[in-house]
Image (tube, rainbow, N blue to C red):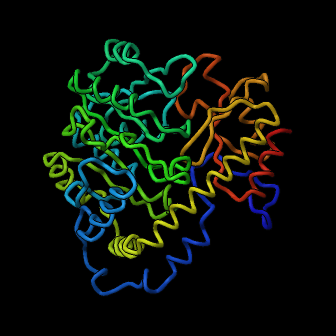
Amino acid sequence: YHSETNPNGIINLGTAENKLNNVEMLSKLNDPKVSTVTAEQLLYGPNPGSDRLRIEIAKLLNRYLKPKVSFTMENICVGNGCGPLTNLCGEVLFDHGDAVLVPGPYYGGFEADLKYGSRVYTIPVPHCEGDCLKVDEAALEKALKNANRPIKGIIIANPNNPFGRCYSAEQLLLFCNFAKSHGLIVICDEIYGLSTWRDITEENIEEGKCIEDYHYLPDPENTHGLWGFSKDFCLNGLRIGCTISYSKTVMAAMQKICFLTCIPTNIDNILVNILSDVEWTDQFILNNNRKLLKNYTHLTNSLNAHNIPYVKGDSGFFIYIDLHQAGIDELDLWMKLLEGGVYISPSQAFFSEDKASERNWFRMCFAVEQDELNLSLDRLYK
C-alpha cells in the first residue's frame, strides 16, 4: 500500500515496524555531523561493537531500565539484530537438541532464531485462564515434565509480543525462581523496553519491572537480556541489537564467536553520535512514546465503538484483538482480510494453542500515521 502510488494495495499492519518518527530520525541520520564516514570506519572494528558504543548503550539502558547494579560496557555485546543474537545465545548457552520453555502464544521469531542455527527448540507453556500475562508454576512444571527434549532454559519477551504489555514484577520473579530451582537459564528479550509508553509518558517507571533488576534476581549469572534499536529507535533496517549479561563467563564466550554477528563500523559510529546527544535521544524517546499512546488510544476507542475485544496494552506498538465475532475459521478470515486490503498477524503466527478460545485472535500494529490507521480500520470493519 502507498497512498499515492498504490492506494488499493494491502496495508501492512502485521510487521512490527514503527513509522511514526521517520521525519525526526531521517533528519538526524542525514546530519553530516552524525553520519560522515571517516578513514577509521574503513577499517575493521571490534567484533562486539566499539567501546564507545557499548558505553553509550550501557548509559542509555541505565537511564531507562534502572537496574540495581548499573551496566557497563563489559555487560554489553553488540550485534546485527536481536534475531542473530538470540541464535548467538543459543550457541553459547545450550547444546544442540536442548529446548527452552516459552510462555505462549509467543513471538514466532523465537522458533527460527533458536532452531535454525543453534538447534535449540521451543516448548510452549499455556497462560492462566482469563489472564494472558499470568503463567503459574503448575503449568511450568507440567511443560518441564512432559517435554520430549532436555529443558535447559526459559525465554520470554518483556514487553510481551504479541500482547503489547509488560509482565508484572511478580510474574518475572516467578519465572526466575522457577528457573533457579530447576537449574535453568533465563533469556529475556526486551526489544520494546523503551516503548513502555504508559510508564514513560507518565514518568512512572516501576522499579523491579525489568529483568535486570539485580537485587531481585535469584540467579543473575544465569539471567540474560536482549535489547535493540529496531523498535525503540525505529531502525529496523539497520538491524542492531545487543546481549546483556552480568556473567563474565557468558560475555567472554559471546565475544569469542561474535565475529559472526558484528556490525559495520560506520553504523557503530552513527549510533554513538545519536546516543551521545542525550538531550535529543531523551526527547525522541519521550515523543515516540507520546505518539504510541495517542495511536493506541485512537485505535482502542474505535475498537470499543465496534464492540471488538482486545488485550489492554501498555507497551510496544501492537494490540491483540479478538475477531471471533466474524464466525469463520482463523486462516479463512485472514485471507478475507488480505483480500479486503489489510494484513494483520493471526494467532497461529504466534504458535497459539489449537483450541477455539486461542484462535481468531490477531496482532494489529498501530505505529502508522492516523490516516493509514483509519483506512485500515475501515477495511477491517467491512
- Residue drawn at the location 20% of the way across and 25% of the way down: 183
Residue 353 sits in quarter: top right
- In the picture, the quarter occupied by the N terminus is bottom right
At x 39%, y 70%, the residue is 275
Quadrant position of the C terminus in the picture: top right
Toward which corner of the image does residue 56 lie, by quadrant?
A: bottom left
On screen, residue 35 above or below 175: below
Residue 358 % position (x, y): 60, 22
Question: Is 298 left, or right, of 89 in this rendering?
Answer: right
Q: Find the residue positioned furthest to the right.
A: 382
Foreground residue among 284 and 106? 284
Q: Is residue 27 left or right of residue 307?
A: left
Q: Position of residue 330 (x, y in %)?
A: 69, 27
How many marks the image carries: the answer is: 0
Q: Is residue 50 left or right of residue 273?
A: left
Instruction: State the residue at coordinates (77%, 48%).
Output: 376
Identify which residue is drawn at 31% across, 62% down. 59
Q: How far from the left and from the top, in percent, is residue 145?
A: 31, 12
Residue 360: percent from the left, percent from the top?
68, 27
